[in-house]
Amino acid sequence: MTILVLAVIIFVVFSLGQALFAMASGPDESGRVVRALTRRIVLSVLLFAGLMLAWKIGWITPHGT
């Protein structure tokens, strides 16, 4: 589970970097910035929802509990 979460976080940061590079490279005619940021937001929301679901099912437990 930890490896999956870390992989998604790394992909989210990579997607953010893609958006930054596309934004810095000039005018965005192809919509690369929008696609990269949309992908980042969708992955972040899915990661959060997946973590909440895994907690409710009992696959993971928060620290201190």
Image: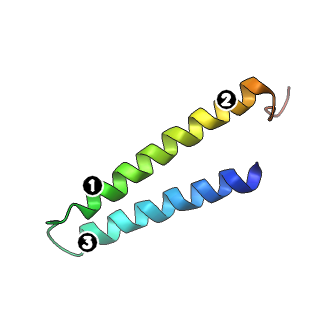
The image quarter containing residue 35 is bottom left
Neighbour class for label 1 at 10 Å: few (<14), some, many (≥20)? some
Name the residue nearer the viewer: 23 or 36: 36
Helix, strand or loop at label 1? It is helix
Name the residue nearer the viewer: 51 or 65: 51
What kind of residue is marked 1? Answer: Val
What kind of residue is marked 2? Answer: Leu
The residue identified by callout 1 is 34
Q: Are marks 1 and 2 in contact (CB under 8 Å)?
A: no
Q: Which mark is residue 61?
A: none
Label 1 or label 2, whichever comes before in sequence order? 1
The residue identified by callout 2 is 53
Helix, strand or loop at label 3? It is helix
Q: Position of residue 53 (x, y in %)?
A: 67, 29
- Quarter holding the C terminus is top right
Q: Which mark is residue 24?
A: 3
What kind of residue is marked 3? Answer: Ala
Label 2 or label 3, whichever comes before in sequence order? 3
Q: Position of residue 29 (x, y in %)?
A: 13, 66
Q: CA distance from mark 2 to mark 3?
A: 37 Å
Q: CA distance from mark 3 to mark 1?
A: 13 Å
Left or right of 65 on screen, residue 22:
left
Left or right of 23 on screen, residue 60:
right
User: Residue at the location (76% across, 26% down)?
Assistant: 57
